[in-house]
Image: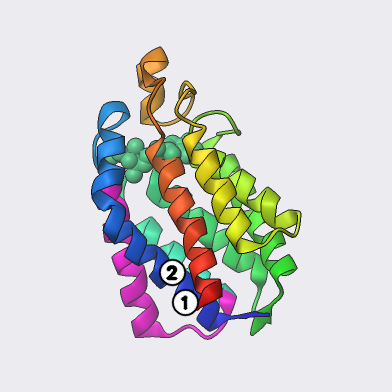
Amino acid sequence: MLDADHFRRWMTATAASVDREAERLTALDSPIGDADHGSNLRRGFRAVTAALEKEAPDTPGAVLVLAGRQLISTVGGASGPLYGTLLRRTGKALGDAAEVSEEQFTQALRTGVDAVMQLGGAAPGDKTMIDALVPAVDALDAGLGFGAAATAAEQGAEATTPLQARKGRASYLGERSIGHQDPGATSAALLVAGLAEAGAG
Ligand code: ADP
Ligand code: MG
Ligand code: MG
C-alpha cells in the first residue's frame, strides 16, 4: 500500500531531478519552443516541496491535490495547467483514503492523464507529454511496476524525436519540429522516474 509519505517522496524526488535536469529541459525547449521549460518546472516543483513542508497534507489525495494547485499557480506556460491538472485530478480520484493500492493509484493516474488529454486536446503521437504519460500508465495497468513504467516513459519521450508536433508551441514550426525530442515528454519521464525512486525510498 502507498501512503502520504510515498507521494511526498514522489514529489521531492521529482523536484530534485527537475532541478538537476532544468538546463537540459530548457535546452530541449530552445529549438522547438521558447527555452523556458526547465525554469518553468523548477519554479513549480520548488513551490510544491515548500507547500508540502508547510501544510503537511496527510493523505495521498491531499498531497497530489496540493502539488497540482501549486503547479497551476506558479509555473506559467502551457505545462503548468497541464501538469497541475494531472496531479490534481489524480489526487481527487484517490479521495481521502490514508493508503491506496498500486491498482487504485494506476486507475487514478489514468483519470489524471485523460483529464490532461481533454484539457490540452493532445492524443498520443502529437509530440507532447502525453507520449510519455500514456505508455507509463499502460505499463502500470499491465502490472509491470514503477521501474517498468519509468522505462516506458523514457522510451516514449525518446520516440517523440521523429514526430511532427501537433499541439503546443512546437506545432507552430510544422515540419521543422521534426528531429527534436519534446521537452514536456522528457519532463514527464522525470516525473514517472520519481515514482520509481519514491518506491525504493
Ligand atoms: P510553453 O510552451 O507555454 O512555454 P512549457 O515550455 O513549460 O510551456 O511546456 C512545453 C511542453 O508542454 C511541450 O513540450 C509539451 O510536451 C507540453 N504541451 C504543450 N501543449 C500541450 C498540449 N496541448 N497537450 C499536452 N501537452 C502539451
Ligand atoms: Mg516553453
Ligand atoms: Mg513559455
Location of ligand 1 given as a quarter of the image:
top left
Residues in magenta? 37-60
Cα distance between the residues tagged 2 and 1: 5 Å
Q: Please, which residue is most extreme toward the top here?
A: 175
* Count of numbered circles on the image: 2
Task: Write the residue at 53% across / 86% down.
Answer: 58
- Identify the secondary structure beneath mark 2: helix
Verify whether residue 80 appears in magenta: no
Q: Are marks 2 and 1 in contact (CB under 8 Å)?
A: yes
Above or below residue 164? Residue 12 is below
On screen, residue 90 versus residue 82, left or right, reads right
Q: Nearer the viewer, residue 95 or 35?
A: 35
Question: Picture coordinates of residue 82 (x, y %)?
Answer: 47, 48
Q: Nearer the viewer, residue 178 or 40?
A: 178
On screen, residue 76 versus residue 105, left or right, reads left
Residue 8 is tagged as 1
Residue kind at label 2, given as amino acid type: Met
Task: Write the residue at 67% across / 66% down.
Answer: 105
Above or below residue 105? Residue 144 is above
Task: Write the residue at 48% across / 70% down.
Answer: 10
Question: Picture coordinates of residue 43 (x, y %)?
Answer: 26, 59
Q: Quadrant of residue 179?
A: top left
Residue 115, visible in the rendered structure: no
Question: Picture coordinates of residue 99 (x, y %)?
Answer: 66, 82
- The residue labelled by disc 2 is 11
On screen, residue 96 versus residue 172, left or right, reads right
